[in-house]
Amino acid sequence: MSGLAERLREVRERIARAGRNPDDVTIVAVTKGLDAAACREAIDAGLAVLGENRVQEALEKMAVVQGAAWHLIGHLQTNKVRQAAGRFALIQTVDSPHLVEALARIAPAQPVLIEVNVAREPQKSGVDPGSAHELIDTAARMLDLKGLMAMGPTRGDPGPAFRELARMRNEAEQRLGRALPWLSMGMSGDFEAALAAGSTMVRLGQALFGPRPN
């Protein structure tokens, strides 16, 4: 068994130990900085969703790697919207009305998540939780809104932040009168806490691929 296959098996076991059915949790394999061969290895191991932080790097890999759904999981700059819109299976990092409007002008059917800064850390992207409900409602009118996304806090217990995002998603479902099935929260260092809070999608790099080269 390859190193990646073994680490994927361990991740699925950790998901099960967290009380969740691994089949109900989407694993986004974070392939930032990895080459096309590593992306193909991930697909061959059964990882059907690949996540990239930078639009240009993602597009270069999409051109030569087949068989994956590609998610944009890094901050989307407005000057990259034209390149990104309609190219990704999911853009997870929509965090402003301006970005919603820019995407909608080009690809109104684009599936998106709203990124919320529930960690309340200035270095992190995401709409402020106090403004999130308005942005969620706007995105639901103009794009194909699938749910919410967040990063946990840099330090301390991530549970409260993740539970806040889950509550926000539940409130949005009631307000909109429809399901928002994707709750993307949890990375290699905190995904069990995210799963306990109801995450349906985890974004894993080091847990799958090991430490990245400098």
Image (tube, rainbow, N blue to C red):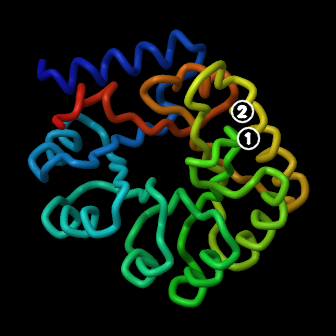
Frontmost of labels 1 and 2 is: 2
Residue at 63% across, 70% down = 144
Q: Are marks 1 and 2 in contact (CB under 8 Å)?
A: yes
Residue at 36% across, 48% down = 49
Instruction: Identify the secondary structure beneath mark 1.
Output: helix
Quadrant location, the N terminus: top left
Taking the view exactly as shown, the residue that stands out farthest to the bottom is: 105
The span from disc 1 to disc 2 (Cα, nearest Å) is: 6 Å
Residue at 55% across, 80% down = 103
Q: Circle 2: is it few (<14), some (14-19), or many (20+) Cα within 10 Å?
A: many
Is 194 in front, or is 177? 194
Tag 2: residue type?
Ala
> Which numbered marker is on residue 165?
1
> Which numbered marker is on residue 161?
2
Compared across the picture, whether 105 is left or right of 209 comes to right
Is 156 in front, or is 142? 156
The quadrant holding residue 2 is top left
Above-or-below relation of 12 to 107: above
Above-or-below relation of 207 to 118: above
Instruction: Identify the secondary structure beneath mark 2.
Output: helix
Tag 1: residue type?
Leu
